[in-house]
């Protein structure tokens, strides 16, 4: 009987070796090669700098649609305590009519093109962009130049938009994740421009005048701070001609006095708690100071961020979660959801975890997070790092799906790095990360560093700050 089973096993192995296994291995090798070839053969990002200092960058994929936009190197970080909120206010006013078009004319023109016009303001950037058919790119850029250079800033429109922004602030106050991250910035960068909110305080919104808006535009809008980005069905030569035609004569920024040098924003390990026991769930963020955009440590921190991963109770997953923190969250019911984050600015950043949990689970969740941080610093394995690298590359490629996502990537990287990093170079940088790289960057940024904590809701169970600070190192290392 034993001899018969042995013969059957040998026959099965022989058959498998001749068929599935060999073919699968060859398929894996070809798939790996095709990924590298695909990344190398991506359309190049062409860049041109005009005499005015304005930069033009585009990726032509030959698509039937296109996204073009203006990325401006100015955001809420450029404001003062008295003018906090003016950058976001100006973003709203750009769509309320120009000297050439009324608000109705502008909206009808965009509608008739079948296009979409949008904008957003961050702490370091302001963006205006349009999605349209590739044949309508010249018209879209002309409209963008008009709303940037010729906004009417009428008094009645300002008053009407003041009410809109105040209602928007009320909506943001109901989004507890936004509230927690604003608190996190205010305590991490207290006393610095990064500590202020993007929307600004209510009293500022009620008092901002046309003169404040005009002064902000004159001081911070101008070709040297502009990047015209395009993706999809765009011709780079045409974009350069259009940029020169519509922005070439623009002066600025114009300063009444020499502007202060952009000083680094000081990070302070600290905490802020807004306890409200009437709320059903606790919302908590715990972080450390991360790296700036151009730092060589940014890629290792992104891999470490992916190692922690994210988890949501509604998505399922339990003992088979690859992330130890996700596995513990699922098995022990530590939280309803959590997500790791890596927020970067010019010279600094915030790297940490945001989670939502039941009132009496705060302590256990924070303990598990800090245990995972210590493992990153001391005992992360090559297997875990390789898994995180693959996930990071997958997420990176998934986020570049569509002309708008690619255009956003082009514009942001041109402002942050002065160039767009090719995908194959980014992949090579990720592939170069090892377990030792993660441990080294963990020791530099996480180990024995002062964390920053922001918590809102029933947070009685959250450990006191000294306890959390004491868990940022291991005696046994």
Image (cartoon, helix red, strand yellow):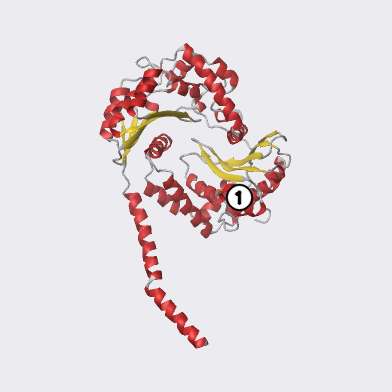
Name the image quarter holding residue 57: top left
Residue sitting nearer the eye, 435 or 390: 390
Per the image, label 1 sits on a secondary structure element best described as: helix
Q: Nearer the viewer, residue 367 or 115?
A: 115
Decide which of 405, 448 is in the foreground and name it.
Answer: 405
Answer left or right for 111 relative to 286.
left
Residue 457 can be seen in this image: yes
Reading the image, the residue beneath label 1 is 373
* Residue at the image position 40 percent from the left and 76 percent from the top: 15
24 sits to left or right of 281: left
420 vs 226: above or below: below
In the depicted structure, whether residue 16 falls above or below residue 60: below
Residue at position x 59%, y 21% from top?
202
**Residues packed near mark 1 inside 10 Å, few (<14), some (14 to 19) or many (20 plus):** many
Image coords of residue 38 (percent x, y)? 34, 51
Most extreme residue toward the top, as rendered?
A: 155
Q: Quadrant of the C terminus?
A: bottom right
> Taking the image as drawn, is residue 80 in sight?
no
> How many numbered tags mark residues here?
1
Residue 459 at x, y percent in the picture: 70, 39
Residue 136 locus on image (x, y percent): 30, 30
Q: Nearer the viewer, residue 42 or 311?
A: 311
65 sits left or right of 8 in the view = left
Q: Position of residue 310 (x, y in %)?
A: 56, 48
Name which residue lies at 37% across and 21% down: 106
């Amino acid at each position: 009987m034993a001899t018969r089973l042995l013969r059957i096993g040998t026959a099965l192995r022989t058959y498998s070796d001749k068929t599935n296994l060999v073919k699968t291995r060859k398929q894996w090798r070809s798939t790996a090669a095709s990924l590298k070839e695909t990344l190398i053969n991506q359309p190049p990002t062409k860049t041109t700098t005009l005499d005015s200092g304005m930069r033009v960058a585009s990726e032509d994929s030959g698509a039937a649609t296109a996204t073009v936009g203006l990325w401006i190197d100015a955001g809420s970080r450029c404001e003062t305590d008295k003018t906090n909120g003016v950058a976001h206010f100006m973003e709203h006013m750009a769509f309320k009519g120009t000297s050439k078009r009324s608000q109705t004319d502008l909206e009808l023109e965009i509608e008739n093109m079948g296009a979409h016009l949008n904008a957003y303001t961050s702490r370091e950037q302001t963006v205006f962009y349009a999605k349209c058919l590739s044949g309508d790119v010249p018209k879209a850029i002309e409209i963008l130049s008009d709303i940037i250079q010729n906004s009417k800033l009428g008094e009645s429109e300002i008053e009407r938009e003041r009410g809109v922004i105040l209602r928007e602030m009320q909506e943001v106050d109901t989004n507890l994740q936004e509230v927690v991250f604003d608190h996190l910035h205010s305590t991490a960068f207290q006393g610095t421009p990064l500590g202020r909110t993007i929307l600004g305080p209510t009293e500022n919104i009620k008092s901002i005048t046309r003169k404040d808006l005009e002064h902000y535009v004159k001081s911070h809008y101008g070709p040297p701070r502009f990047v015209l980005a395009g993706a999809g069905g765009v011709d780079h030569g045409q974009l350069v001609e259009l940029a020169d035609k519509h922005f070439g004569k623009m002066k600025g920024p114009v300063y009444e006095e020499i502007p202060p040098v952009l000083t680094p924003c000081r990070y302070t390990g600290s905490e802020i708690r807004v306890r409200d026991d009437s709320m059903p769930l606790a919302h908590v963020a715990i972080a450390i100071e991360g790296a700036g955009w151009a730092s060589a440590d940014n890629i290792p921190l992104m891999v470490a961020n992916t190692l922690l991963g994210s988890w949501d109770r509604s998505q399922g997953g339990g003992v088979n979660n690859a992330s130890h923190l996700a596995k513990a969250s699922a098995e022990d019911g530590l939280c309803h959801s959590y997500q790791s984050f890596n927020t970067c600015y010019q010279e600094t950043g915030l790297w940490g975890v945001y989670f939502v949990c039941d009132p009496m689970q705060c302590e256990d969740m924070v303990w598990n997070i800090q245990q995972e941080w210590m493992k990153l610093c001391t005992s992360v394995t090559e297997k875990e790092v390789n898994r995180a690298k693959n996930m990071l590359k997958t997420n990176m490629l998934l986020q570049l799906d569509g002309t708008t996502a690619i255009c956003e990537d082009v514009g942001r990287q041109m402002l942050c790095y002065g160039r767009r990093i090719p995908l194959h170079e980014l992949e090579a940088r990720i592939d170069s990360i090892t377990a030792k790289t993660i441990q080294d960057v963990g020791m530099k940024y996480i180990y024995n560093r002062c964390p920053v904590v922001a918590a809102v809701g029933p947070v009685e169970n959250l450990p006191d700050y000294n306890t959390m600070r004491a868990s940022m190192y291991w005696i046994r290392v």
